[in-house]
Image: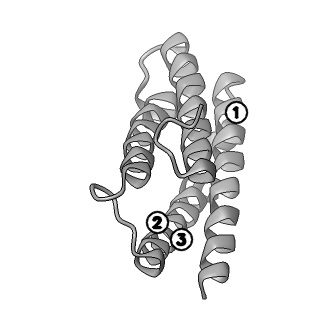
Amino acid sequence: MYMLLKHLHMTCAMLTLLSFAIRGFWMLTDNNLLQRRWVKIAPHIIDTLLLVTAVGLTITISQYPFVDAWLTAKLGGLIAYIVLGTMALKRGKTKAIRTMALILALACWGYIFAVARSHMPFPW
């Protein structure tokens, strides 16, 4: 069960990154595809599955945020990623702000990935 959850979680994480990067590119190029209904719905489905598998993994491995430092770091990175992601795709008032938020959100994703691989809050 652990390996199934882990692989599903990793797949969803990659789909989340790919989806966000594509939508970020569309934002930068003012592409109308960003306004399609399926483009607004699909990331929520992927992210919900990502979150469900994350909770399943924490229970399976008996490690939890605010108890285990690396999971606390991942949670903090996730919150930053979500805030920056909404700024990049919706809430940023100018394209310059949205672009900077996009870059920082992608950096947060990279940090989350590095923490997940190393199980250390400071993976560098």
Most distant residue in the left direction:
66
Task: Count the marks.
Answer: 3
Residue depth check, mark 2 versus mark 1: number of the one nearer the observer: 2
Which mark, by number, is residue 49?
A: 3
Q: Going 43% across and 42% down the picture, which residue do you hit?
A: 82
| Left-right relation of 14 to 67 | right
Query: What is the quadrant of residue 2 in the picture?
Result: bottom right
Q: What residue is pinned by disc 1?
A: 26
Secondary element under disc 2, as helix, strand or loop, is helix
Estimate the spatial distance between the alpha carbons at disc 2 and disc 1, rounded to whole Å: 25 Å
Secondary element under disc 3, as helix, strand or loop, is helix
Along the line of sight, which residue is nearer the eye, 92 or 54? Answer: 54
Q: Is residue 47 above or below residue 82?
A: below
The quarter of the picture where the C terminus appears is: top right
Q: Position of residue 116 (x, y in %)?
A: 57, 52
Residue 120 showing in the rendered view: yes
